[in-house]
Every structure is written in C-alpha cells, then in structure tokens.
Image (cartoon, rainbow, N blue to C red):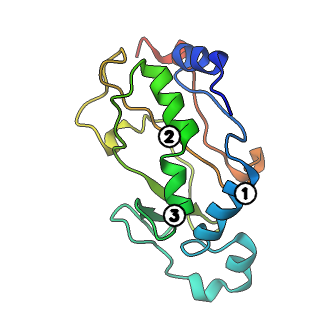
C-alpha cells in the first residue's frame, strides 16, 4: 500500500489520521496468530473467565483492567507490525527524512467488565517524553495505534481531537 499525500496532509493539519487496512490479509492473520499467545479472544475470555481473572501482562503499566506486553514479542509476525514497511514509509514521508527510531511498542488488551476504561481526554506523550513535545518535525513523537480486531463505536474506540481545536492549548 502506498502512502497517500492526503493522509500526510491530514496528519499535519489535524495531528492524526486513520489509515484502514494497510496490512495485507496474510500479515493480519499471522500477527493475530502471534497475538493469541498473549491475549485471549473475547470468546475465549468469556468462556473461560476464571482462568483469566488475574490477567495483567508483563508490563509495569499493566493494571487489573487491561493487559499490556512490551515490544519485542515472541513471534516474528507481531514484531513486524511495529516496524511494518508502510508505517516506516509513512513516518519517513511525514518528517521528510529516514532518521527515525522506534521509542517503544506494546500490545494492549481490554476486556469488557474487567475495568473502567472511561477517562478524561489527555495527550499520551507522558509515557515516553519528559515534556510536552514542541511544534515542528525536527524532533517528533508519532504515536500509532494498530487495531487487530474491528472496533466499532459500541466497543469504545480511541477518541481523538483535531489539533485545529487544541493548538492554542
């Protein structure tokens, strides 16, 4: 999949962009096969709930409400998602050079009834920077979320606000 200029323009204008299906179906299937090593499917979770009562993951940031495992993972396909050629190409186009680094990666699972996921709107920069990032692309943090399952409005997707509405804050 090619990086579309309209996606780059949208990111620069709004501070986010949604790119659907940048991975090929076989890449998704392989990553999901690796993912089940870490996170049960919803069907497995509900069918065997007592088994997963203390499911927390390996991260220090895990909590009783959600499961988190830090990069790298057991399974090449899941590791490839974090450094997927499309994501690398997107970032290189976004910043205009190839001097990029992956600061961190994690897989996170959230299961209904396990925790309260409602939270205030907030920036996610505090998990890997000392200060709110400055404007420009000289040094930039580009957070990305890759959903491995369909997430509809009733499943509590991530909510984002355009920088057009927040730049002055």
Between label 1 and label 2, give the one nearer the viewer.
Answer: 1
* Residue drawn at (22%, 36%) of the image: 130
Name the residue that disc number 1 marks.
Answer: 26
Name the residue that disc number 2 marks.
Answer: 120
- Check disc 2: other Cα within 10 Å, few if <14, some if 14-19, many if 20+: few
Q: Which mark is residue 76?
A: 3
Of labels 1 and 2, earlier in sequence is 1
* Quarter residue 169 falls in: top left
In this orientation, does residue 136 appear? yes
Q: Circle 2 sits in a helix, a strand or a loop, which is it? A: loop
Residue 76 % position (x, y): 51, 64
- Check disc 3: other Cα within 10 Å, few if <14, some if 14-19, many if 20+: few
Q: Circle 3 sits in a helix, a strand or a loop, which is it? A: helix
Gap between marks 3 and 1, in whole Å? 13 Å
Position above or below: 31 against 135:
below
Position above or below: 95 against 50:
above
- Check disc 1: other Cα within 10 Å, few if <14, some if 14-19, many if 20+: few
Q: Nearer the viewer, residue 100 or 166?
A: 100
Gap between marks 1 and 2, in whole Å? 37 Å
Between label 3 and label 2, give the one nearer the viewer.
Answer: 3
């Amino acid at each position: 999949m090619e990086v579309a200029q309209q996606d780059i323009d949208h990111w620069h204008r709004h501070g986010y962009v949604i790119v659907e299906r940048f991975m090929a179906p076989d890449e998704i299937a392989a990553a999901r096969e690796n993912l089940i090593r870490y996170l049960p499917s919803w069907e497995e979770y509900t069918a065997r709930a007592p088994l997963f009562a203390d499911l927390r993951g390996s991260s220090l940031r895990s909590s009783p409400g959600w499961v988190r495992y830090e990069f790298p993972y057991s399974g090449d396909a899941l590791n490839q998602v974090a450094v997927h050629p499309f994501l690398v190409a997107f970032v290189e186009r976004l910043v205009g050079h190839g001097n990029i680094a992956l600061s961190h990666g994690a897989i996170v699972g959230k299961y209904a009834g396990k925790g309260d996921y409602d939270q205030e709107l907030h920036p996610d920069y505090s998990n890997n920077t000392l200060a709110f990032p400055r404007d420009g692309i000289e040094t930039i943090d580009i957070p990305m979320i890759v959903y491995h399952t369909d997430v509809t409005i009733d499943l509590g997707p991530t909510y984002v606000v355009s920088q057009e509405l927040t730049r002055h804050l």
